[in-house]
Image (tube, rainbow, N blue to C red):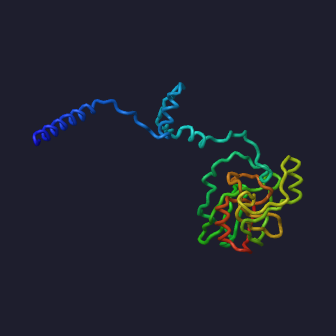
Amino acid sequence: MMKQLVLAAALFGIFSTAAIADDRYATRPPVVLSPDLTAPWINQLGGGRVRPVVYQRPVVRQPQRGIFQRRVLRQAPQAAPQTVSAINPGIPSIRRPIEPQYLPQMVDYDTTEKPGTIVIDTNNRFLYLVMQGGKARRYGVGVGKPGFEWAGAHKVTRKTEWPDWTPPSEMVRREAAKGHYLPARMDGGAENPLGARAMYLGSTLYRIHGTNAPWSIGSAVSSGCIRLRNEDVVDLYDRVNVGTRVIVM
């Protein structure tokens, strides 16, 4: 009886091993996917044309330095030379560097006038501030144009920083006849023809003042006033006081 049981167990083991071995080569059941995963595959098998997904590298655009620089450096078209706008009637718009002799400098100056006196040589376009020891501080100036020259002695009666400008009615009419239309009044500032400072002479309309047209220094273009570059009139302004004697010759 025992032998029969042992033999039966052995036969069962042999058949079980063979079954397992055969199972390796049996047809596998289809893999079942969830509806969310199978949907794309079913759509592709539905007869429609499958469009492959194509991945492209991102395009890195380099800045167009040449074009950018040309746009920045490009200048506005240059207009033909013409007169300056109404606030500077009669002054050429062609800008030129100031000549060296019109820059401020200390010079020998032989005069009987007291130190602190201002002497203006309109013919040579120089203003002298008389100093001690036969010296003077010399500045280049712009002076009255032909027909507007004058000479005389006055005192500085008032000093103003960044003065307003109210052109005289006679000047307004005169310039309007030439096609230059002056403002009734102009606040002080960089565009004001009187520039950064003004020193008023006696009870006249004449002034020693700055300018918004520094290239006009050395020329006879004003209506009688004496003009300096802004940096020069500031320097002179700080050196003189109300009551300073001014001689124009």
Residue at the outermost left position: 3
Residue 135 spot, x, y in % from top left: 60, 67
**Location of residue 169 by image quarter:** bottom right
Residue occupying the point 68% across, 68% down: 237
Q: Is residue 46 above or below residue 89?
A: above
Residue occupying the point 66% across, 65% down: 234
Q: Is residue 18 above or below residue 198?
A: above
Going by the image, does 34 lie left or right of 132? left
Residue 230 spot, x, y in % from top left: 67, 60
Residue occupying the point 70% across, 56% down: 125
- Total number of numbered labels? 0
Q: Quadrant of the C terminus?
A: bottom right
Of 80 and 131, the residue lying toward us: 80
**Location of residue 119 by image quarter:** bottom right
Going by the image, does 91 lie left or right of 55? right
Of 185 and 22, the residue lying toward us: 22
Residue occupying the point 50% across, 28% down: 45
Residue 131 spot, x, y in % from top left: 62, 70
Q: Quadrant of the N terminus?
A: top left
Residue at the outermost front position: 1
Residue 147 spot, x, y in % from top left: 83, 53
Of 7 and 141, the residue lying toward us: 7
